[in-house]
Amino acid sequence: MRTPGPRGTATPPRETRAERAARLAHADRDATASIRRMRLKAYRRREETERYDRLLEAVADWERAGRLRAFLGATELRLADGVAAPPHAAEWLAWAWAKAEALDPLGPTAELRRFMRVKNRRNVPDDELPEFSIFDLR
C-alpha cells in the first residue's frame, strides 16, 4: 500500500528481502541468458565467416589443381614430341601429378570433409555450441 509522500505524491512500497532476492535472481537469469545469446550470435557469425573462407579456399585449390593439370598435360605432350627430357622427368611428372590430385578438393584422393568443417570453436563453452553439420547449413 502506498503512503502519501510530500505534496501528495505516493511513495512506492518497500520490497521485502525475499522480493528483492527474487527480483535480483530474475535479473541475473535474464542477464546470463542475454550474454549467452550474444556469445552464440557472435559464434555463429564467426562460423559463417569461416565456412565462407573455407569455400573460397576450396575453389582456389580446385582452380590451382586444374591449372597444374593443364600445365602437366602440356609438359607431357611436349616431352612426347621428342624434346630432350632430363633423366628425372618421369619421376618429377609423377610427383607433380600426385600434388595436383592432392590439391583438388573434388579429386579422387580429396578429403572433402576438411573443407566442409569449422576449424576452431574458441571462446564458447562446449555446452553452448550448436552441433555443426555440413548438411544443416543455414
Image (tube, grey):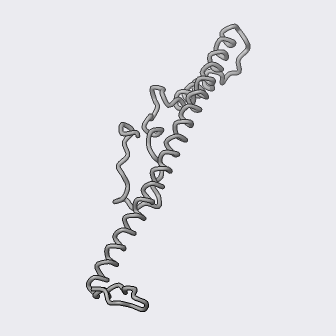
Quarter of the image containing the C terminus? top left
**Is 113 displayed left or right of 1 in the figure?**
right
Horizontal and vertical percent position of residue 87: 68, 22
Of residues 108 and 118, the one nearer the viewer is 118
Of residues 93 and 119, the one nearer the viewer is 119
- Residue farthest to the right? 84
**Is 29 displayed left or right of 55 in the figure?**
left
Residue drawn at (36%, 39%) of the image = 136
**Is 132 located above or below residue 32 in the figure?**
above
Residue drawn at (69%, 12%) of the image = 78
Horizontal and vertical percent position of residue 70: 63, 18
Horizontal and vertical percent position of residue 128: 36, 58
Horizontal and vertical percent position of residue 106: 48, 27
Residue drawn at (43%, 90%) of the image = 7
**Is 85 displayed left or right of 109 in the figure?**
right
**Is 52 located above or below residue 7 in the figure?**
above
Residue drawn at (35%, 84%) of the image = 12
**Is 56 located above or below residue 39 in the figure?**
above
- Residue farthest to the top? 81
- Asked where in the image residue 17 lies, by quadrant, the reply is bottom left
Quarter of the image containing the N terminus? bottom left
Count of marks placed on residues: 0
- Residue farthest to the front? 8
- Asked where in the image residue 24 lies, by quadrant, the reply is bottom left
Of residues 66 and 37, the one nearer the viewer is 37
